[in-house]
Image (cartoon, rainbow, N blue to C red):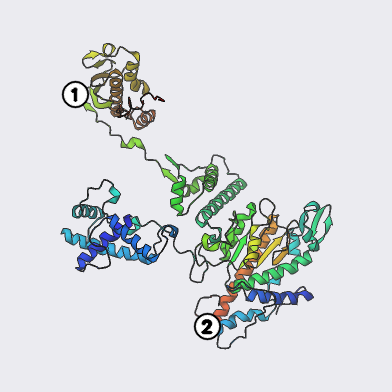
Amino acid sequence: MAVRTLAKGLWGLRQSRAVTIGYSCNGHHYSTAESIKVSQPEPNDVNEKVLSLPLEKPDFFRVSELFSLKDLFDARVHLGHKKGCRHRLMEPYLYGCRLEQDIIDLDQTVEHLQQALNFTAHVAYRGGVILFVSRRRQFSHLIENTAKDCGEYAHTRYWQGGLLTNAHIQYGVGVRLPDLIIFLSTLNNVFQQHVAIRDAAKMNIPTVGVVDSNCNPSLVTYPVPGNDDTPVAMELYCRLFKMTINRAKDRRRQMELLHGLSAPPSPPS
Amino acid sequence: MAASCVRTVGSFIGKCGHCSLGINTITSQVSRQVLNRQICVSSALHGKNIASMGPEKFTAEFIQKQVEEYNIGKRHLANMMGEDPENFTQEDIDRSIAYLFPSSLFVKEARPVMKHPDIIFPKQKAAQWGEDGRPFHFLFYTGKQAYYSLMHDLYGKILKLEKYQDRLKVKGLFSSEGKKASLGLSRWLTKEELEQLLVQPTSQQDYNHFIQLIERLLSMPYSGTEEEFILRYRYQLEAESRKQTVQPLQKDEKGVAFSSAEGRRKTSNSSVILRDCGSGRVTVNGQDYLHYFPFLQHREQLMFPLQFVDMLGRFDLQCTVSGGGPSSQAGALRLAISRALLSFLSEGDMENMRQAGLLTPDPRVRERKKPGQEGARRKFTWKRR
């Protein structure tokens, strides 16, 4: 198994949380930290085996090999906003302040990003619906293209109020809501927190979010402190997410071929 | 609804052909009222609230069944009329239905009709997601997938064009007068037409944004490469001048070219013979036009078409006019002169005349007086007591 670049004690704890949430995102969004349901893999049920195999190793999809701290630094992920824009809850993630500009701690970013990518990979492996959300107009086209390339979904336009909470009326009866929402920028055009964060928390949908130094990271399940304004940084994030999702889906296809499953991948209820 | 009409006619003919009149389908009359009443009664019995169900939803199987019934019914109809079932066109169907079910209803849409189900049933959105629940379109969760995917494609094209311009600039071949898209006589699609195209309600703001973006694409140099895409969103205005019938140029015994035309205005009828002599004399009903039209304005009306195409002294006019008063006679003569001139003119001149309004007959006629009023619009004096 790949050697983890960072060996922190918290990794094991976080990983079990990832296991829980990753496991119970199949249509039931009632995941809490206590309900660790590890199903006993029945030897005659190949489907269960395919689903439980990635959970045995900590970094099954080897997401830590996708990027390094130097890549993040070159993409200027560590640059935050000015001191006046700082959000109180972001202070633990900041390394310091240089000439009134906040610098984000890249060690923490690497940790958080690895967890986020690992979680995304698990969700994609199980055929979950992933929605990319951002309200930044300059990267809207890039994000939509990323979503198209992965085979997942994007929403970089005006967010209508009831899209998640009023789904049966907005879309029709029997719609399937996203299993994971990835925020490439948590703020909307008026520098307020995006409505989808609150709605996802209401509908028990896990979220991954790139939080800048002026954002509120509290409701995001997997916050990733980092810059969301520079084009280089956004291209890096899009590339990383695209690679993880494609990797996870390819892995799933391989596993199914290996175990001789003929049915198309469908999340078991 | 016309839908119910078709169902009736199609199933009626099909069942007639099979010689088994169905018990549960309405086969007696082809009247909308009967069918409507039947449906209302059944829903009321079930206790459903029809108003809250929204517009009728037709499933794919239902439409397919309708198509099969239509095809079978078409063949039976052809047999009934004694014609060849293989080459039975839509016009033949319309003719046969008008013969078999004569109807004197004023509203044409209420008469029995038998058309292909795709024309009758409105285009509806197909199922948006597959059996595993995953939606097909990558912008499904925005709610307006067709519109936003159109905007996404438009923006993609703008970026592509900009990259192309950059490449040309690097090579030094860039010119700001690059090939722009030629549109011809056309206008942008209206909001309603766009909604129909996208099968999705669009708000005024969305429509304005779309027009803004596509105008931006149009204004960029080298937009000629995307011309085909842009033309899809423009409505071609039929060149009205093509509908104009041009009088043929005739030659009389002396070899002089002449043409004749007629014109009408209010209650006047006129007919004009335009001779290519070269003098510029005008005769109206045997008299000189100076005597017949003492007013300058009427003579100006006569001369205006010739002045417009700068052929004032070239023609000889021989006019006859009857009915109406002097102004309406002048107007009728003007229209007749313009029409007669067409045979001497080119396409471009004809288009100019059409745009100037010389070829449009004036539709204004005297409005009738209504009872209870003093005139057509004037009411009787209102007295408080």
Residue located at (30% from left, 20% from top):
B330
Image side of residue B176 versus residue B341, left or right:
right
> Under tag 2, what secondary structure?
loop
Which residue has dot 1 on it? B252
For the N terminus of chain B, give its image quadrant: bottom left
Mark 2 to mark 1: distance in Å?
A: 93 Å
Tell me where residue A46 sits by quadrant. Answer: bottom right
**Mark 1 burial class by Cα count in 10 Å: few <14, some 14-19, many 20+:** few
- A188 vs A259, left or right, is right
Q: Is residue B184 visible?
A: no
Q: Is residue B212 left or right of residue B324?
A: right
**Rendered view: A31 above or below B186:** below
Residue B141: x and y in percent read: 55, 61
Residue that label 2 marks: A260
Front one among A16 and B275: A16
Q: Give the percent coordinates (x, y) of residue B235.
A: 42, 44
Amino acid identity at mark 2: Gly
- Residue at image coords 54%, 39%: B177
Q: Indicate the chain on which mark 2 is placed.
A: A
Which of these two is toward me, B182 or A8? A8
Q: Amino acid at mark 1?
A: Asp
Q: Residue furthest front?
A: B385
The verdict on a common chain for dots 2 and 1 is: no
Locate residue B105, reporting x and y percent.
25, 48
Query: Which quadrant of the figure has residue A5?
Result: bottom right
Chain label for disc 1: B
Image: A4 above or below B374: below
Which quadrant: the C terminus of chain B? top left
For the view shown, which residue lies furthest in the bottom direction? Answer: A43
> Residue A159 location, x and y as percent?
60, 56
Tell me the crowding category of disc 2: few under 14, some 14 to 19, or many 20 or more residues within 10 angstroms, Cα based. few
Q: Which element is circle 1 on?
A: loop
